[in-house]
Image (cartoon, rainbow, N blue to C red):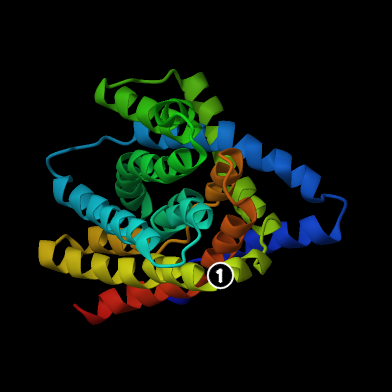
Amino acid sequence: MSHVLLLLPDFLLILLGFVLCRRTALNRSVWDGVEKLVYYLLFPVLLFVAIVRQPLQAGALMTLAGCGLAVVGCGIALSYALGRWPGVDARLHASGAQTAFRFNSYVALALAERLGGVQSVAWTALLVALCVPVCNIAAVWPLARHAGQNFLRELLQNPLIIGTVAGLVGNLLGLQLPELLQITLSRIGGAALPLGLMAVGAGLQLGALRDAPRLAAALMSIRHLILPVIAIVLVRVAELPAGQQVVVVAFAALPTASSAYVLASRMGGSGSFVAGLVSLSTLLGMLSLPLALIGLDATR
């Protein structure tokens, strides 16, 4: 499939959610419940199943994991640095910083199979397993500090971290799920991708970006320009196999996590500003992801 068309199926689901929310009886009140269902149940189960089922050969995948973590680390450092800009609103920065380094795992896992089949799914699952906890810790920290909340408690209650850690522990212990339970959990997790993508569409809104346009532009530049470029340099210097190079670069160019909106709202941040960033990032991802893969091809 052409790089330009890679995200088209996912974009159509996002568009469907947008239309359903605004043109049918399935209005905002319905999608509020869908977002919570995906965030607290479906997506944690999806992460758990994806991680626990894929053998993680730590030695062979060390360089791949290092590149993924390096990309995320650069995003965290750059987004935190924006808080030192003169005139930056502390609440908006604490709310929106996460959008520069978090990634939409719905899109990542939906995209992985189209990029390279089952093997790409396994590599993507490893990156998700390692980077979701790091990203969530980095996302919770500024919000908890700004709102005066207990940082450790927020981490221990985060469903994405719980699902990821449970999957990692199960994988390392060689957990074998009974067939009936595996089928059940797989079906629960499978519902996360279409519902999560439609929920992103239902929540699309750009108006709140007017509150801090310079901050929004800087955060989106990190997410969709700087990190993909860093990823291309890293995978070439590290001489990763071609398939792993594609996975890391695609990972770096993903739209930001749609759950960023839920996290900001639940922790007293500016939910509307983050919703605008998520919406803009979703649209920019349609361009940045294929362009990043084309850029990678150009370096070979």
Q: How many marks?
A: 1
Where residue 218 appears, as percent x and y from the top left, is 42, 70
Residue 297's place in the image compared with 86, above or below, is below
Q: Amino acid at mark 1?
A: Leu
Give above or below for 164 relative to 126: above
Q: Quadrant of residue 188?
A: top right
Query: Can residue 289 be seen?
Result: no
Q: Is residue 275 above or below residue 195?
A: below
Position of 284 with respect to 246 (left or right) is right
Residue located at (36% from left, 61% from top): 84
**Horizontal relation, residue 187 to residue 151: left or right:** right
Q: Secondary structure at mark 1?
A: helix
The answer to whether one can see residue 226 in this image is yes
Q: Residue furthest bottom?
A: 298
Left or right placement of residue 169 versus residue 198 in this view: left
Name the spot of residue 121 as percent of width and height, x first. Answer: 36, 48
Residue picked out by circle 1: 283
**Front one among 30 and 140:** 140
> Between 137 and 234, which is closer to the camera in this rendering?
137
As rendered, which of 234 and 81 lies closer to the eye? 81
The quadrant where residue 142 appears? top left
Which residue is the extreme one toward the front? 86
Kindly indicate the quadrant of the structure image that contains residue 220.
Answer: bottom left
Q: Position of residue 238 (x, y in %)?
A: 12, 61
| x 55%, y 52%: residue | 258
